[in-house]
Amino acid sequence: MMEIRDLSFSYGSQEILRGIDFDVEDNSVLSILGPNGTGKTTLLRCMCGLHRQTSGTITVDGKEISELKGRELAKTIGFVPQSVPVPRTSVFDAVLIGRRPYIDWSATSEDLEKVEEVIGALGMEHIALKGCDRISGGEFQKAQIARALVQEPSVLVLDEPTNNLDISNQHRTMHMILDAVRQRGMTTVMTMHDINLAVHYSDRFLFMKDGRVAAYGGLEVITEDLIHEVYGMDAEIIDHRGVPFVVPSHSAKYLHLASHHHPHDVNDHIH
Amino acid sequence: MMLDAGRGLEDRGTREGYIAYSRRKVGFLAACAVLLAVVALLSLGIGNDLSLSEIIHYIFHPDGSWDSAIVWDLGLRLILAAVCAGAALGLAGAVMQCILRNQLASPFTLGLSNAAAFGASIGIIMIDAGTIAGVTSSSLGVSGTALTTVLAFVFAMIATGIMLLMVKVTDCTPEMIVLAGMAISAIFSAGLSFFQYIASDTALSSIVYWQFGSLGKVTWDQLWLMGIALVLVAAYLIYKRWDLNAMEAGEDVARGLGVNVRRTRVLTLVLSAVLTAIVVSFTGVIGFIGLMGPHIVKRLIGEDNRYVIVGSMIMGALVLLVSYLVGQYAFYTVIPVGIITSAIGGPLFIAILLHGRIRRSPA
């Protein structure tokens, strides 16, 4: 269980996060949503021990994250940043580095077995010995997630795991992440831009606005008022087989225009 | 043929394929090491009429005879100097390219070579001025060449200190360290030019000769010091190879894997700078080994530091040894090894640049 209590974070005099409070249950998936520049990534970095919070506590099973050191931190939290440099090693090597917290002198056969198993689970056997600079962006993203999985942390933290993926790859990647974390009993926290993708794969939602929590809870917190409050945008929420689907209201105007094929009218309406 | 080998690996399990893939890299390193040993041994026979068995006899049973002196002082000393200096520069280059995230980084990126040359030129001018050198040399109890060597080392360490201070007081990125290194290099280069301008003709020729870089002036004592420093630094960096690999995966990933990125970066930079300073103060400026050694290895077996660190040492030693032999025996007169390495290194540097260009542009 991960508990965040009254968390604040400032860069110098600029306050980025204020009074953040929430829990993440074991084996659950939490999505953090909100507009650009609202502190989502900063919050993730605090949760991973990459930033030290100005005040408040972040604990995993009662242990304060900012007090964990080196290998202990690596075994508690696994982080997949939004973008990382592409190393010029094979995919297998790039995944194997996730075992670093367990390796003393050289990788044991147990380390290699775990890497092989995760690579198999993500269906990457055919590219295991290819260079990371020779595979697609989606495949490299999967390799990054595989790296965090072999790290075997209690909590997996993902910053925009589906960024730059096409719609089919977004869903395939999310399925794969969920299968892998459920099987391993890991807790997952991720930032997401796409609400309609997040609703399919998350147990809980944390909406942020200007460095504070705007809403926290299950599907029920996603309301038209909340979308307006957080994103400053009118939206309709349509029920699609019991799952809310968020449609921006103003987009209907263009939908209407497009269906009538009156390109000249578009200019008249855009102001 | 390459394709068939690849398919062979895929037919096996992922793990077995990976083990075979790793073994090929180890095999490559072993082959290079054997090649280095063979070249070193054969080169002992060049320029004299001793047989291989006589050479091996004198290596293990030095007896103070003329032939024994040929094997040890004319042969082994220079060959071991080439191997140690080459390995040290190759190692420093590989590590700096990794830590500074820059393919073109080398032991001289931090301005070490110009700083060392600046220090050496002070020493040479002091000796040339006579009276000052007499005082300094007798009070320190060192000879003129030793003074030059010590000053070269001291100024190379001053350049390292400036870099270290920058890293300590600011939060500077590897990219900034590279740029600052160029600035430090330019400052010492200006000082060096000034000394060349005011130096007498004899001092000027000594300064220029020092900069050429040559193995001939390395003594047995210096060789021991260089060897011990090389072994210690190499052992530390080999021990840290997983951390260096983690840092190649990005700073956030490395920190998340429990690597103390800042400390590792500073410590590795300082250790490779000290190693470079030792080599440069004994041999003068030998360029491009730190660039060539690592790049040849990376092209052939990829950029995994578990293999690149050792590979760059072997390849650096091999390239410097061959350059030395070319400079020593290929022409009518002996040419300083620094000139040969730059003559080979320059075209290679251009090839590396062009290779990057070609890969970036769409096919």
Image: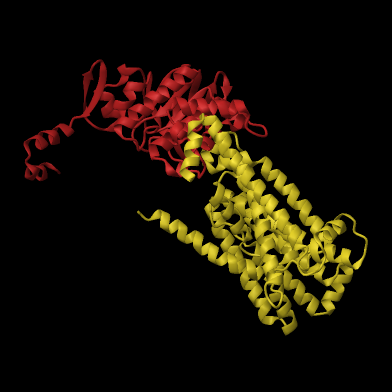
Chain colours: A red, B yellow
Between residues A132 and A180, which one lies in front from this camera angle? A132
B84 vs B359, left or right, is: right
Q: Nearer the viewer, residue A47 or A156?
A: A156
Residue A175: x and y in percent read: 37, 23
Q: Is residue B186 visible?
A: no
The image quadrant where one finds the C terminus of chain B is bottom left
Q: Residue B362, how many percent across, how many down?
A: 35, 54
Report whether A70 appears left or right of A170.
right
Query: Percent from the top left, x then y, of residue A35?
Result: 33, 34
Looking at the image, which is closer to me, B34 or B180? B34
Q: Residue at x 54, y 37 (%)?
A: A93
- Residue at 10% of width from left, 37% of height from top? A257
Q: So how many labels did they put on this image? A: 0
Corner quadrant of residue B359 = bottom left
Q: Is residue B54 left or right of residue A229?
A: right
Q: Residue at x 60, y 53 (%)?
A: B294
Q: Is residue B255 above or below residue B268?
A: above
Q: Is residue B165 visible?
A: yes
Within the image, what quadrant is residue A97 found in?
A: top right
Q: Residue at x 42, y 20 (%)?
A: A179
Query: Can you say whether A63 is above or below B275 in the image?
Result: above
Picture coordinates of residue B286 (x, y %)?
A: 66, 65
Between residue A212 and residue A24, name the one nearer to us: A24
